[in-house]
Image: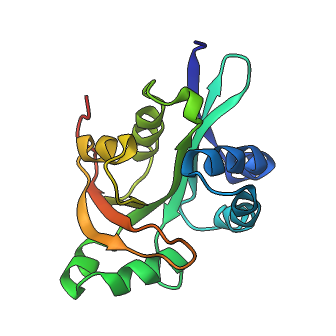
C-alpha cells in the first residue's frame, strides 16, 4: 500500500483533472461511465461557485485515489433548491444558512477502508468558514454513511429521491467543527 497525501486544489486544478475525478465518482457510486461524462460538465461549473473548496488524495506515485469538493450553498442552485423543498421551514432555515454543500466525496474502491475519505472530509471541513456542512449520500448502511455519522452528521431528511437517480438518498448535516470521528 502506498502512502497518500491530501492536497488542497484550486478550481482550476480540479477542472484540469475533472475526468480523473469522475472516473473515481462512477466507480465509487456504481454509475455507468456516461454519468461521469455528464457530471464532469456540472462539476466544472461548480468551480465558479462562491466558497469552492477541493481536496485531492494523491498516492506517492502521483495517482489520484480520491477527491472531495463543495461550495457555499445558495438559493438558485439545483441541490440547494431541491433540499430546501424537502425540508420543513424551520429545518431549512436552521441548516441552509451559512452552509457548505459537500457536492462530492469519493475514493477509489480499491483504496477504501484506509481512512482516505475521512481525511478528505476533515481537511475540507477544517478549511472552510461555514457554520454547517451538508451532503447527500445513498440512504443505506454503507461505510460512507457510518463515517458521516462518526463525524457528527445528523439526518435532515431520509429516503429522498433526487431527479435522475432511482436510489433513495439521505440528506445529512453537521455543525462545524466536525466531531472527532475516531
Most extreme residue toward the right is: 16
Instruction: Please name whichever residue, 80 or 145, is drawn nearer the observer in this view of the structure.
Output: 145
Work out whether residue 131 can be spotted.
no
x and y, in percent, of residue 132 in the image: 31, 60
**Which image quarter is the C terminus in?**
top left
x and y, in percent, of residue 70 in the image: 53, 57
Work out whether residue 69 can be spotted.
yes
Which of the 4 quarters of the picture holds residue 97?
A: bottom left
Which of the 4 quarters of the picture holds residue 27?
A: top right
Q: Is residue 173 above or below residue 84?
A: above
Q: Is residue 44 above or below residue 111?
A: below
x and y, in percent, of residue 16 in the image: 80, 48
Residue in the image at 57% along x and 45% along y: 28
Residue in the image at 43% along x and 42% along y: 121
Q: Is residue 150 above or below residue 26?
A: above
Residue in the image at 57% along x and 21% along y: 4
x and y, in percent, of residue 71 in the image: 52, 62
- Please state the total of marks drawn on the protein image: 0
Q: Describe the colour scheme in one phrase.
A: rainbow
Instruction: Please name whichever residue, 130 or 56, is drawn nearer the observer in this view of the structure.
Output: 56
**Which image quarter is the N terminus in?**
top right
35 left or right of 97 in image = right
8 left or right of 124 in image = right
Residue in the image at 49% along x and 75% along y: 79
166 left or right of 108 in image = left
Which of the 4 quarters of the picture holds residue 167?
A: bottom left
Amino acid at each position: 500500500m502506498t502512502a497518500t497525501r491530501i492536497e488542497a486544489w484550486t478550481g482550476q486544478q480540479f477542472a484540469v483533472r475533472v475526468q480523473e475525478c469522475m472516473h473515481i465518482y462512477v466507480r465509487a457510486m456504481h454509475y455507468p461511465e456516461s454519468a461521469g461524462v455528464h457530471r464532469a460538465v456540472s462539476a466544472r461549473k461548480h468551480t465558479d461557485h462562491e466558497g469552492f473548496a477541493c481536496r485531492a488524495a494523491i498516492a506517492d506515485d502521483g495517482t489520484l485515489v480520491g477527491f472531495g469538493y463543495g461550495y457555499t450553498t445558495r438559493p438558485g442552485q439545483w441541490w440547494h433548491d431541491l433540499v430546501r423543498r424537502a425540508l420543513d421551514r424551520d429545518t431549512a432555515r436552521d441548516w441552509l444558512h451559512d452552509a457548505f454543500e459537500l457536492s462530492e466525496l469519493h475514493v477509489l474502491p480499491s483504496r477504501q477502508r484506509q481512512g482516505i475519505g475521512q481525511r478528505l472530509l476533515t481537511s475540507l471541513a477544517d478549511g472552510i468558514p461555514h457554520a454547517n456542512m451538508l451532503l447527500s449520500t445513498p440512504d443505506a448502511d454503507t461505510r460512507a454513511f457510518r463515517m458521516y455519522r462518526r463525524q457528527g452528521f445528523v439526518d435532515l431528511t431520509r429516503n429522498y429521491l433526487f431527479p435522475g437517480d432511482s436510489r433513495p438518498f439521505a440528506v445529512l448535516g453537521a455543525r462545524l467543527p466536525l466531531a472527532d470521528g475516531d
